Amino acid sequence: MKNNLIAASILSANFTYLGKEIEDVLKAGVDIIHFDVMDNHYVPNLTIGPLVLRSLRENGIKCLIDVHLMTKNIDNLIIDFIKSGASSIIIHPESSYHLDKSISLIKNYGCKAGLALNPSTSLNCLEYLIHKLDLILVMSVNPGFEGQKFLNHIYEKIFQIKKIINKKNILLEVDGGININNIKKIAISGANVFVIGSAIFKNKMPYYKTIKNIRLKLNTIF
Ligand code: DX5
Ligand code: ZN
């Protein structure tokens, strides 16, 4: 597996032709599609549900798809998204009454489980759960919208989580405000999966050039 993985957040894609957008970014070299689910309760925005994921799968999209659940009432949605073809499900601790149970639900269906930490969420919630996690998603913006600015205190938070992960087989994914200018510092802080929305889809450059430039930046780290 590559050292650094790029996940394209389709929140910034053109939804008129979502399938083509996904095929294009995959051809351009992204490793993962990041599927942001918002319910207008947990976050003040509304996006897409399991139906869209199922349709992508039924129409030949075979890549890894991260489902990032920013919703309330997650347990039913977890099952629906797994049945619709999610490769991993990422949930927020604040969105579950019984977090251990929700994470176990994901694992029991044979899906990868991730925990997402908002900018102000403490690392304490990792203490009794980390042994069940496949990935930790560090939010570097408050969830809800694309195109926000990366919050500066998150570099240190990534570094602290990297120390907690130590040698465990857990991906450290960062989501929000990542671009060509800050990705190197984020990687040096300890991240190995980078969720990128507007810097790919809202960039005037062709997707393959953006991805190539990002990889070149990441390759300058020794
Ligand atoms: C924010 C979402 C992110 C976001 C990333 O709530 O989880 O995935 O869309 O978009 P950019 O890269 O534009 O911050
Ligand atoms: Zn996300």
Image (cartoon, helix red, strand yellow):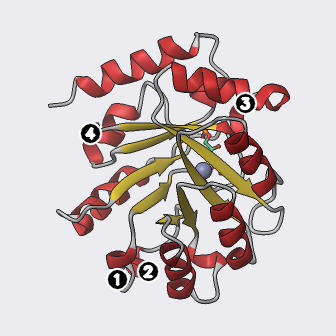
Residue type for callout 1: Glu
Residue found at x 52% / y 67%: 120
Rendered view: 151 above or below 79: above
Query: Would you place residue 39 above or below residue 73 in this image?
Result: above
Callout 2: SS: helix
Q: Residues within 10 Å of mark 4 (few under 14, many from 20)?
A: few
Residue pictured at 32% horizontal, 61% vertical: 170
Cβ–Cβ below 8 Å for labels 2 and 1? Answer: yes
Q: Which residue is mark 1?
A: 127
The residue beneath circle 2 is: 125
The dot on residue 62 is none
Residue located beneath label 4 in the image: 3
| Percent coordinates x, y for residue 199 in the rendering | 57, 27
How many numbered discs, if any? 4
Asked if disc 1 and disc 3 are in contact, CB closer than 8 Å, the reply is no
Q: CA distance from mark 2 to mark 4?
A: 26 Å
| Mark closest to the chain's N terminus, 4 or 1 | 4
Task: Identify the amino acid type marked 3.
Answer: Gly
Question: Tag 4, which secondary structure?
Answer: loop
The answer to whether residue 158 is left or right of residue 195 is left
Residue in the picture at 53% in, 20% down: 27
Q: Is mark 1 within 8 Å of ligand 2?
A: no
Q: Where is 63 relative to 53, above or below? A: above
Q: Which residue, given by chain and number where applicable, does mark 3 sit on?
A: 19
Q: Which is more N-terminal, label 3 or label 4?
A: 4
> How far is mark 1 from mark 3, CA to CA?
39 Å
Assess mark 2: CB under 8 A from ligand 2?
A: no
